[in-house]
Image: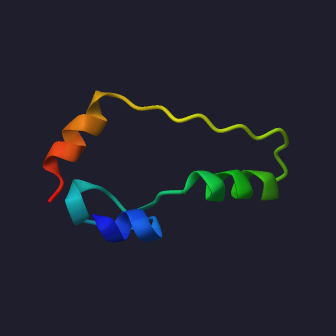
């Protein structure tokens, strides 16, 4: 899981999830600004699934 958090890349079939790219907050803001969006503001959202995922990390 550490490699996913470091690179943002999730290969298909790992940890029961599809292929995906997870942005860092700074990277997401940069991409949104580069796409022409203005006044970009990011907010984090956490739910109960976060605690369940932390308990299952190995």
Whether residue 1 is visible: yes
Q: How is the image coloured?
A: rainbow
Position of 38 relative to 57 (above/below): above
Q: Quadrant of the N terminus?
A: bottom left
Residue at 85% of width from left, 42% of height from top?
Answer: 38
User: Which residue, as the protein is rendered here, is positioned at the far top?
Assistant: 48
Residue at 30% of width from left, 38% of height from top?
Answer: 50
Whether residue 11 is visible: no
Which picture quadrant has residue 49? top left
Residue at 83% of width from left, 38% of height from top?
Answer: 39
Position of 4 relative to 45 (above/below): below
Q: Disc count in the image?
A: 0
- Where residue 51 appears, as percent x and y from the top left, is 24, 36
- Where residue 33 appears, as percent x and y from the top left, is 79, 52
- Where residue 11 appears, as percent x and y from the top left, is 34, 70
Q: Is residue 7 left or right of residue 48?
A: right
Q: Quadrant of the C terminus?
A: bottom left
- Where residue 35 appears, as percent x and y from the top left, is 79, 55
Which picture quadrant has residue 42? top right
């Amino acid at each position: 899981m550490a490699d996913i958090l470091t690179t943002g890349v999730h290969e298909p079939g790992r940890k029961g999830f599809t292929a995906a790219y997870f942005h860092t907050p700074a990277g997401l803001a940069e991409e949104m600004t580069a796409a022409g969006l203005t006044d970009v503001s990011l907010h984090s959202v956490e739910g109960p699934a976060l605690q369940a995922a932390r308990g299952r990390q190995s």
